[in-house]
Image: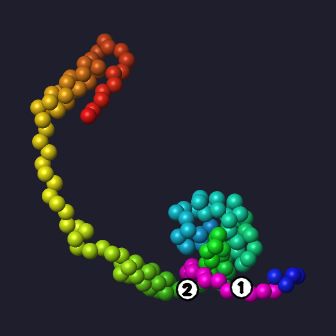
Amino acid sequence: MSDFDDQEIEVEAEEVLITQEPVELYKILKLANLVDGGGQAKHLIGEGYVAVNGELEFRKRRKTYDGDVVQVGDQFFVVMLADEEVIAAASYDASLQAVQESEITDDVFESEPIEDVVPTPAANEAVEQQTKDAEDAVKPGKKGRKSIDFF
């Protein structure tokens, strides 16, 4: 064992709350909002971008437990077992904080009225001609397709 293995390193880790253990590793990545779906999570793990408790992990369904530390790049996550009430409260707090941090004001929702668009006679004639051409293209006896360009 080298001196490096005996060293303790302090890092900031985000909590990933689970209600039961074990939880498969790819699901931890989904719960941490690192990926949109399980396929992306499995790809990251399979390509060697994920470590668990300091060791590179290639098993997508590796079981994780309370206290495991998952590393993806320079981000660290600690798996924590909690009951559903704690998870619901944490989710509510995160949502409330996101709303408080947003800079949405009332004037964002105010807009200028949109003026009515009045078609010109030339535009009306062009639409009528394209409609006529389309009808001619589908008459029986004509073969092939005719492309129609709209505006």
Residue at (65, 69) in percent of width and height: 73
Residue at (70, 72) in percent of width and height: 51
Q: Quadrant of the C terminus?
A: top left
Quarter occupied by residue 11: bottom right
Would you call the spot at circle 1 few (<14 residues within 10 Å), some (14-19), or many (20 or more)?
Answer: few
Residue 70 to residue 124: above or below: below
Q: In which quarter of the image is the N terminus?
A: bottom right
For label 2, the residue is 82
Residue 127 to residue 46: above or below: above
Residue 76 to residue 89: above or below: above
Q: Do the residues labelled 1 and 2 touch (CB within 8 Å)?
A: no
- In the image, 39 versus 74, the foreground residue is 74
Residue 87 to residue 39: above or below: below
On the rendered structure, is 97 left or right of 21? left
Q: Which-is-in-front pick, marks 1 and 2?
A: 1
Quarter occupied by residue 65: bottom right
For label 1, the residue is 9
- In the image, 107 versus 68, the foreground residue is 107
Q: Earlier in the sequence, mark 1 or mark 2?
A: 1
Q: What residue type is labelled 1?
A: Ile
Q: What element carries label 2?
A: loop
The magenta segment is: 5-23
